Image: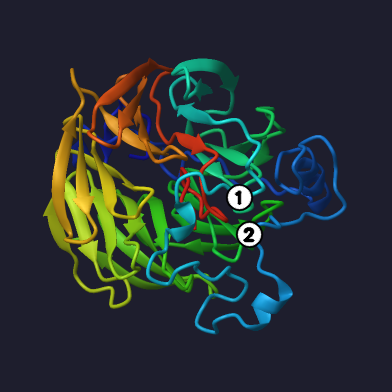
Amino acid sequence: MARGPIRPHPTPGGATDPRAVARPSPARARAVMPWAAGALLLACAAVTGCAAGEPERPREKPSRSAGARPSAAASKAADPRLLPGMPPPLDPRDLYAADRPGRLSPVVKRFPSRVYVPNTLSNTVSVIDPKTYKVVRTLPVGNQPQHVVPSWDLKTLWVNNDLGNSLTPIDPATGRVGRPVDVHDPYNLYFTPDGKYAVVMASADRALVFRDAHTMRVVKSVPVSCYGVNHADFSPDGRYFIVSCEFSGELLKVDTARMKVVGQQRLPFAGAMPQDVKISPDGRTWYVADMMADGVWVLNGDAFTRPRLMPTGDGTHGLYVSRDSRHMYITNRGEGTISVLSFATGKLVDRWRLPGGGSPDMGGVSADGKVLWLSGRYHSEVYAIDTRDGRLRARIPVGGGPHGLAVYPQPGRYSLGHTGVFR
């Protein structure tokens, strides 16, 4: 859930949800400060992956990842149905075919394996060594960091300082923190499949803000009529994406190229609070976690018709695909469990319970697929869970209010954002 983990949030209808968290109203949010293009380029040159691999060495021109960018020949033969410039799927039957165990891009192959945990109440990022299950560094960042987001070109980790109105870059090769970039209300961050734009989920500002993926310069701000835009995922062809609006219980369908909302619907559940969004490997089905409906909405994204609810557990929140594309791990934050869904049958096949309880929230799967890493939002801890049987391998103390942790590096050719959605 978007807001800091303790205080209740009054929803637009006036009710207070004890599991939601307070967030300043748009009126309290600071106005976006104008910034000169020259200052942007200087800031970009000082950060990791904004243009290059080393944060303190300026480059004349930002570049994309050579491992993800299609060749000229491939571009000429590109499927016209795809978003122009988007790398074609490795396997049309499996969107996650590039995410197989150990299939690391040359860009990230030499990066040390780490788990980056944003602590919303401590204004820090805890860095965990997954081999020892120990915190090896604690990085000070901006006010209320919500998610750690891999950039499209895989070179940078962006810390979303929601109330600090900034993005803090981390070089995953060295662990070095770069100069923060001014970005207003960055609750969450995604990247269009062609690598051209970053999409800021400006929840308090009620906008989807398209920015240059390298400089973070605003290209277009798209106002929305719903409340609490927070999570998203993209269609197989990259032509559209589905967005959840947690505070008004709505879903948006957005045309990627036109940067325009083309569909909007309210979920058929009183008090719905949609969270994470994930598409199935075959690209036919969308899943939307709902922490108040205590389940997952199953949606046809193309038709954008009324979805059906699949009950999973109290406080359903995060969605993660296994390395073999066979299962999805569903976190039930309110009851300390993880439900396991089979993509083949569309049914739940297991439920793992954290011994002694917990509040599993956001996270990701290890590069080898053997461990599911999740933040414990209300318990100031991180869980390492064995994906073979759901056994808890480790419970690691971190800062206050841990939220959208990123396991990095992970397999994949490019990142669509959030805590690591790779294709």
Q: CA distance from mark 2 to mark 1?
A: 8 Å
Residue 258 seen by the camera: yes
104 vs 156, nearest the viewer: 104
In x, y percent, where is residue 93?
37, 70
Is 337 rendered above or below residue 251? above
Residue 34 in the image: state x and y as whole percent: 70, 49
Task: Say how the picture is coloured.
Answer: rainbow
Residue contact between numbered discs 2 and 1, judged by CB atoms under 8 Å: yes
Which quarter of the rendered picture does the N terminus lie within?
A: top left
Residue 288 on image: x %, y %: 27, 55
Q: Residue at x 15, y 38 (%)?
A: 351
Q: Position of residue 22 (x, y in %)?
A: 34, 33
The amino acid type, in three-letter code, at marker 2 is: Ala
Which disc number belongs to residue 68? 2
Q: Amino acid at mark 1?
A: Ser
Name the residue tied to disc 1: 105
Residue located at (51% from left, 70% from top): 256
Q: Residue at x 47, y 47 (%)?
A: 418
The kind of secondary structure element at disc 1 is loop
Describe residue 286's horizontal placement relative to residue 145 as left or right.
left
Q: Nearer the viewer, mark 2 or mark 1?
A: 1
